[in-house]
Amino acid sequence: MSRRSRRTPAPLPQRDGIGPVRVRLPPDGPWATVRDHLVERLPVPAAEVDALFAEGGVVTADGRPVAADAPYPPGGQVWFHRRPAEEVPAPYPPVVLHRDEHLVVVDKPHFLATTPRGRHVTQTALALLRTRLRLPELSPAHRLDRLTAGLVLFTVRPTERAAYQRLFSDRLVHKEYEAVAGYDPAVALPRTVRSRVVKERGVIAAREVPGEPNAETRVELLDHRGGLGRYRLLPRTGRTHQLRVHLNSLGLPILGDPVYPDVTDPAPDDFRRPLQLLSRVLEFTDPLTGEERRFTSTRKLTAWTAYDRWAHGGPEPADGSGPWPA
Protein backbone atom coordinates (compact mmCIF):
# COMPACT_ATOMS: atom_id res chain seq x y z
CA MET A 1 0.00 0.00 0.00
CA SER A 2 1.25 3.46 -0.80
CA ARG A 3 0.58 6.74 0.86
CA ARG A 4 -1.86 9.03 -0.84
CA SER A 5 -0.10 11.39 -3.19
CA ARG A 6 -0.69 15.04 -2.53
CA ARG A 7 -1.09 15.60 -6.28
CA THR A 8 -3.67 12.86 -6.79
CA PRO A 9 -7.05 13.69 -5.26
CA ALA A 10 -8.71 10.71 -3.63
CA PRO A 11 -11.92 9.56 -5.35
CA LEU A 12 -13.48 8.68 -1.99
CA PRO A 13 -14.18 11.08 0.91
CA GLN A 14 -12.65 10.65 4.33
CA ARG A 15 -14.38 8.32 6.74
CA ASP A 16 -14.08 9.12 10.46
CA GLY A 17 -11.24 11.49 9.62
CA ILE A 18 -9.25 8.86 7.71
CA GLY A 19 -8.65 8.99 3.97
CA PRO A 20 -8.92 5.99 1.67
CA VAL A 21 -6.05 3.67 0.80
CA ARG A 22 -4.56 3.69 -2.68
CA VAL A 23 -3.10 0.43 -3.99
CA ARG A 24 -0.86 0.53 -7.04
CA LEU A 25 -1.23 -2.64 -9.10
CA PRO A 26 2.08 -4.22 -10.26
CA PRO A 27 2.72 -4.11 -14.02
CA ASP A 28 2.90 -7.90 -14.22
CA GLY A 29 1.74 -10.86 -12.22
CA PRO A 30 -0.41 -14.02 -12.26
CA TRP A 31 -3.70 -12.39 -11.20
CA ALA A 32 -6.74 -12.69 -13.44
CA THR A 33 -8.79 -10.12 -11.51
CA VAL A 34 -8.30 -7.19 -9.16
CA ARG A 35 -9.97 -9.29 -6.46
CA ASP A 36 -7.36 -12.04 -6.85
CA HIS A 37 -4.58 -9.52 -6.30
CA LEU A 38 -6.18 -7.91 -3.25
CA VAL A 39 -6.93 -11.29 -1.65
CA GLU A 40 -3.25 -12.19 -1.98
CA ARG A 41 -1.92 -8.79 -0.99
CA LEU A 42 -4.07 -7.61 1.90
CA PRO A 43 -3.62 -9.08 5.41
CA VAL A 44 -7.37 -9.71 5.83
CA PRO A 45 -9.64 -12.70 5.16
CA ALA A 46 -10.88 -13.19 1.60
CA ALA A 47 -14.44 -12.72 2.84
CA GLU A 48 -13.59 -9.16 3.90
CA VAL A 49 -12.22 -8.38 0.45
CA ASP A 50 -15.39 -9.84 -1.12
CA ALA A 51 -17.52 -7.66 1.17
CA LEU A 52 -15.64 -4.55 -0.04
CA PHE A 53 -16.40 -5.39 -3.64
CA ALA A 54 -20.03 -6.28 -2.85
CA GLU A 55 -20.69 -2.85 -1.36
CA GLY A 56 -18.95 -1.03 -4.21
CA GLY A 57 -16.14 0.03 -1.91
CA VAL A 58 -13.27 -0.62 -4.36
CA VAL A 59 -13.07 2.17 -6.95
CA THR A 60 -10.85 3.43 -9.73
CA ALA A 61 -9.07 6.79 -9.68
CA ASP A 62 -12.17 8.44 -11.19
CA GLY A 63 -14.46 6.93 -8.56
CA ARG A 64 -16.04 4.13 -10.60
CA PRO A 65 -16.73 0.94 -8.61
CA VAL A 66 -14.65 -2.07 -9.59
CA ALA A 67 -16.47 -5.39 -9.94
CA ALA A 68 -15.05 -8.43 -8.19
CA ASP A 69 -14.58 -10.18 -11.53
CA ALA A 70 -13.08 -7.15 -13.30
CA PRO A 71 -9.97 -8.10 -15.30
CA TYR A 72 -6.66 -7.21 -13.71
CA PRO A 73 -5.28 -3.93 -15.21
CA PRO A 74 -1.45 -4.08 -15.03
CA GLY A 75 0.01 -0.87 -13.62
CA GLY A 76 -3.36 0.49 -12.58
CA GLN A 77 -4.56 1.59 -9.17
CA VAL A 78 -7.59 1.15 -6.96
CA TRP A 79 -8.85 2.93 -3.87
CA PHE A 80 -10.83 1.74 -0.87
CA HIS A 81 -11.36 2.34 2.81
CA ARG A 82 -9.72 -0.02 5.26
CA ARG A 83 -12.04 -1.51 7.82
CA PRO A 84 -10.47 -0.39 11.11
CA ALA A 85 -10.46 -2.83 13.96
CA GLU A 86 -12.49 -1.97 17.02
CA GLU A 87 -10.57 0.58 19.06
CA VAL A 88 -10.63 1.53 22.71
CA PRO A 89 -11.30 5.29 22.95
CA ALA A 90 -8.87 7.39 24.94
CA PRO A 91 -10.43 8.63 28.19
CA TYR A 92 -10.39 12.30 27.14
CA PRO A 93 -10.45 14.20 23.82
CA PRO A 94 -7.77 16.64 22.68
CA VAL A 95 -8.66 20.19 23.71
CA VAL A 96 -8.30 23.06 21.24
CA LEU A 97 -6.25 25.89 22.78
CA HIS A 98 -5.88 27.96 19.61
CA ARG A 99 -7.39 27.99 16.15
CA ASP A 100 -6.88 30.38 13.25
CA GLU A 101 -6.66 30.19 9.46
CA HIS A 102 -3.20 28.61 9.64
CA LEU A 103 -2.93 26.62 12.86
CA VAL A 104 -4.78 24.47 15.35
CA VAL A 105 -2.96 23.94 18.64
CA VAL A 106 -4.33 21.25 20.94
CA ASP A 107 -3.67 20.05 24.46
CA LYS A 108 -3.45 16.29 23.95
CA PRO A 109 -4.34 13.95 26.80
CA HIS A 110 -2.31 10.91 27.80
CA PHE A 111 -3.09 7.69 25.88
CA LEU A 112 -4.23 9.41 22.67
CA ALA A 113 -2.01 8.88 19.62
CA THR A 114 -1.29 11.93 17.49
CA THR A 115 -1.68 10.21 14.11
CA PRO A 116 -2.99 6.84 12.87
CA ARG A 117 -0.57 4.00 13.39
CA GLY A 118 -0.89 0.33 14.27
CA ARG A 119 -3.98 -0.38 16.33
CA HIS A 120 -4.76 3.32 16.80
CA VAL A 121 -6.50 4.73 13.72
CA THR A 122 -9.80 6.53 14.21
CA GLN A 123 -9.11 7.09 17.91
CA THR A 124 -6.26 9.49 17.23
CA ALA A 125 -5.97 13.24 17.64
CA LEU A 126 -5.73 13.79 13.89
CA ALA A 127 -8.81 11.74 12.98
CA LEU A 128 -10.90 13.17 15.80
CA LEU A 129 -9.96 16.77 15.02
CA ARG A 130 -10.53 16.42 11.28
CA THR A 131 -14.03 15.14 11.92
CA ARG A 132 -15.14 17.32 14.79
CA LEU A 133 -13.60 20.57 13.55
CA ARG A 134 -14.64 19.83 9.94
CA LEU A 135 -11.08 20.31 8.70
CA PRO A 136 -10.42 17.33 6.42
CA GLU A 137 -6.98 18.60 5.33
CA LEU A 138 -5.68 19.13 8.86
CA SER A 139 -2.14 17.73 9.26
CA PRO A 140 0.36 17.52 12.13
CA ALA A 141 3.44 19.74 11.98
CA HIS A 142 5.16 17.38 14.43
CA ARG A 143 4.26 14.39 16.59
CA LEU A 144 3.88 13.69 20.27
CA ASP A 145 4.19 10.22 21.74
CA ARG A 146 0.84 8.55 22.53
CA LEU A 147 1.76 8.24 26.21
CA THR A 148 2.89 11.88 26.52
CA ALA A 149 0.35 14.63 27.18
CA GLY A 150 0.49 18.24 26.09
CA LEU A 151 0.87 20.51 23.10
CA VAL A 152 0.61 19.43 19.48
CA LEU A 153 0.56 21.81 16.53
CA PHE A 154 -1.52 21.06 13.41
CA THR A 155 -1.66 22.98 10.13
CA VAL A 156 -4.95 23.79 8.42
CA ARG A 157 -3.69 24.01 4.83
CA PRO A 158 -1.50 21.33 3.21
CA THR A 159 0.44 24.00 1.31
CA GLU A 160 1.58 25.57 4.59
CA ARG A 161 2.55 22.42 6.43
CA ALA A 162 6.18 22.34 5.23
CA ALA A 163 6.89 25.83 6.57
CA TYR A 164 5.87 24.80 10.09
CA GLN A 165 7.59 21.41 9.85
CA ARG A 166 10.84 23.21 9.02
CA LEU A 167 10.60 25.08 12.31
CA PHE A 168 10.91 21.76 14.11
CA SER A 169 13.50 20.20 11.80
CA ASP A 170 15.64 23.37 11.93
CA ARG A 171 15.33 23.53 15.77
CA LEU A 172 13.61 26.91 15.70
CA VAL A 173 10.92 25.90 18.20
CA HIS A 174 11.56 26.40 21.89
CA LYS A 175 10.10 23.35 23.63
CA GLU A 176 9.67 22.82 27.34
CA TYR A 177 8.51 19.60 28.97
CA GLU A 178 7.71 18.71 32.55
CA ALA A 179 8.18 15.32 34.15
CA VAL A 180 7.72 13.71 37.55
CA ALA A 181 10.30 11.15 38.58
CA GLY A 182 12.13 10.07 41.68
CA TYR A 183 14.36 12.55 43.48
CA ASP A 184 18.00 11.71 44.13
CA PRO A 185 20.11 14.43 45.82
CA ALA A 186 23.21 12.73 44.44
CA VAL A 187 22.20 13.65 40.89
CA ALA A 188 23.64 17.13 40.33
CA LEU A 189 21.25 19.38 38.45
CA PRO A 190 20.88 21.34 36.28
CA ARG A 191 22.88 19.52 33.66
CA THR A 192 22.85 18.86 29.93
CA VAL A 193 22.69 15.22 28.90
CA ARG A 194 24.22 14.32 25.53
CA SER A 195 24.33 10.82 24.09
CA ARG A 196 23.76 8.78 20.98
CA VAL A 197 20.21 7.37 21.02
CA VAL A 198 19.08 4.75 18.50
CA LYS A 199 15.63 3.28 17.97
CA GLU A 200 15.40 0.13 15.85
CA ARG A 201 12.29 -0.72 13.88
CA GLY A 202 10.23 -3.34 15.66
CA VAL A 203 12.00 -2.80 19.00
CA ILE A 204 9.96 -0.97 21.64
CA ALA A 205 12.79 0.63 23.59
CA ALA A 206 15.35 3.06 22.27
CA ARG A 207 18.87 2.73 23.67
CA GLU A 208 22.04 4.69 24.14
CA VAL A 209 25.08 3.47 22.24
CA PRO A 210 28.69 4.63 21.94
CA GLY A 211 29.36 7.23 19.29
CA GLU A 212 28.83 10.85 18.40
CA PRO A 213 25.89 12.30 20.35
CA ASN A 214 22.70 12.85 18.38
CA ALA A 215 20.44 13.67 21.34
CA GLU A 216 20.71 16.55 23.80
CA THR A 217 18.49 17.47 26.75
CA ARG A 218 18.90 20.03 29.49
CA VAL A 219 17.46 18.74 32.77
CA GLU A 220 16.46 21.14 35.56
CA LEU A 221 14.96 20.38 38.96
CA LEU A 222 11.96 22.61 39.61
CA ASP A 223 10.96 21.22 43.02
CA HIS A 224 11.09 18.09 45.15
CA ARG A 225 9.14 16.61 48.02
CA GLY A 226 8.40 13.19 49.46
CA GLY A 227 11.03 11.44 47.36
CA LEU A 228 9.67 12.85 44.11
CA GLY A 229 11.09 15.52 41.84
CA ARG A 230 9.39 17.79 39.30
CA TYR A 231 11.68 18.43 36.36
CA ARG A 232 11.85 20.83 33.44
CA LEU A 233 13.24 19.20 30.31
CA LEU A 234 14.56 21.33 27.46
CA PRO A 235 15.31 19.13 24.43
CA ARG A 236 17.74 20.47 21.89
CA THR A 237 17.04 17.53 19.56
CA GLY A 238 14.02 15.30 18.98
CA ARG A 239 15.05 11.64 18.95
CA THR A 240 12.38 9.02 19.65
CA HIS A 241 11.89 8.59 23.43
CA GLN A 242 14.81 10.96 24.02
CA LEU A 243 13.51 12.52 27.24
CA ARG A 244 12.52 9.18 28.71
CA VAL A 245 15.89 7.66 27.80
CA HIS A 246 17.88 10.57 29.23
CA LEU A 247 16.06 10.71 32.57
CA ASN A 248 16.34 6.95 32.88
CA SER A 249 20.08 7.19 32.20
CA LEU A 250 20.33 9.53 35.21
CA GLY A 251 18.66 6.88 37.36
CA LEU A 252 15.43 8.93 37.37
CA PRO A 253 12.91 7.01 35.23
CA ILE A 254 9.70 8.95 34.67
CA LEU A 255 6.78 7.71 36.75
CA GLY A 256 4.35 5.55 34.80
CA ASP A 257 6.82 4.67 32.04
CA PRO A 258 6.02 1.18 30.67
CA VAL A 259 9.30 0.97 28.74
CA TYR A 260 12.11 2.47 30.85
CA PRO A 261 13.76 0.95 32.75
CA ASP A 262 11.71 -2.23 32.11
CA VAL A 263 9.38 -3.03 29.22
CA THR A 264 5.88 -4.01 30.31
CA ASP A 265 2.80 -4.57 28.17
CA PRO A 266 -0.26 -2.86 29.64
CA ALA A 267 -3.66 -3.61 28.10
CA PRO A 268 -4.99 -1.09 25.54
CA ASP A 269 -7.73 -0.05 27.95
CA ASP A 270 -5.46 0.29 30.98
CA PHE A 271 -5.48 4.03 31.57
CA ARG A 272 -4.16 3.86 35.12
CA ARG A 273 -0.97 5.65 36.16
CA PRO A 274 -0.27 7.61 32.95
CA LEU A 275 3.28 8.50 32.03
CA GLN A 276 4.15 11.65 33.95
CA LEU A 277 5.53 13.56 30.99
CA LEU A 278 3.95 16.73 29.61
CA SER A 279 4.74 18.94 26.64
CA ARG A 280 4.29 22.23 28.49
CA VAL A 281 5.45 25.02 26.13
CA LEU A 282 5.87 25.61 22.39
CA GLU A 283 7.35 28.96 21.38
CA PHE A 284 8.40 30.12 17.90
CA THR A 285 8.24 32.88 15.32
CA ASP A 286 5.42 32.15 12.91
CA PRO A 287 7.01 31.57 9.46
CA LEU A 288 3.95 32.96 7.64
CA THR A 289 2.91 35.95 9.74
CA GLY A 290 6.13 36.81 11.61
CA GLU A 291 4.12 36.78 14.85
CA GLU A 292 5.78 35.60 18.06
CA ARG A 293 3.81 32.55 19.21
CA ARG A 294 3.81 30.99 22.66
CA PHE A 295 1.44 28.24 23.73
CA THR A 296 1.23 26.70 27.20
CA SER A 297 -0.51 23.50 28.25
CA THR A 298 -3.22 23.72 30.90
CA ARG A 299 -2.76 20.11 32.00
CA LYS A 300 -1.28 18.99 35.31
CA LEU A 301 0.83 15.96 36.15
CA THR A 302 -1.27 14.03 38.63
CA ALA A 303 1.61 12.31 40.37
CA TRP A 304 2.75 15.75 41.54
CA THR A 305 -0.61 17.34 42.34
CA ALA A 306 -2.39 14.23 43.70
CA TYR A 307 0.09 11.38 44.04
CA ASP A 308 -2.22 8.99 45.87
CA ARG A 309 -4.85 9.30 43.16
CA TRP A 310 -2.24 8.63 40.47
CA ALA A 311 -0.67 5.70 42.36
CA HIS A 312 -4.05 4.01 42.85
CA GLY A 313 -5.09 4.43 39.24
CA GLY A 314 -7.62 7.17 39.81
CA PRO A 315 -8.89 9.37 36.94
CA GLU A 316 -6.92 12.28 35.61
CA PRO A 317 -8.07 15.73 36.76
CA ALA A 318 -10.55 17.53 34.55
CA ASP A 319 -8.01 20.12 33.38
CA GLY A 320 -8.21 20.35 29.63
CA SER A 321 -10.87 17.67 29.23
CA GLY A 322 -13.89 19.84 28.59
CA PRO A 323 -16.31 19.69 25.66
CA TRP A 324 -15.38 20.35 22.05
CA PRO A 325 -15.67 23.95 20.93
CA ALA A 326 -18.64 24.87 18.79
Image (cartoon, rainbow, N blue to C red):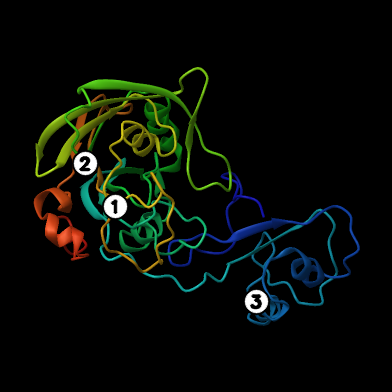
Which label is found at residue 301?
A: none
Relative to the observer, which residue lies in front, 139 or 157? 139
Can you see residue 154? yes
**At 40% from the left edge and 62% from the top edge, which residue is drawn?**
266
State which quadrant residue 36 falls in.
bottom right
Query: Dot 3: few (<14), some (14–19), or many (≥20) neighbours within 10 Å?
Result: many
Quadrant of the rendering where the N terminus is positioned: bottom right
Residue 230: % across, % down: 16, 38
Visible residue check, residue 318: no
Along the viewing direction, whichever of 39 and 149 lies nearer the viewer:
149
SS at circle 1: loop
Mark 2 residue crowding within 10 angstroms, few (<14) / some (14–19) / many (20+) = many
**Percent coordinates x, y for residue 145 in the rendering:** 38, 47
Identify the element where label 3 is drawn.
Answer: helix
User: Quick one: label 1 or label 2, which is nearer the N terminus?
Assistant: 2
Task: Tell me if label 2 and label 3 are in contact, CB under 8 Å.
Answer: no
Q: Is residue 52 above or below residue 198?
A: below
Specify the amino acid type for callout 3: Leu
In which quadrant will I find the C terminus?
Answer: bottom left
Of callouts 2 and 3, the N-terminal one: 3
Residue carrying label 3: 52
Q: Residue shown at 58%/52% (left/top)?
A: 9
**Residue 182, disc:** 2
Seen as rendered, the residue at the extreme front is 186
Q: Position of residue 172 (x, y in %)?
A: 33, 23
For label 1, the residue is 256
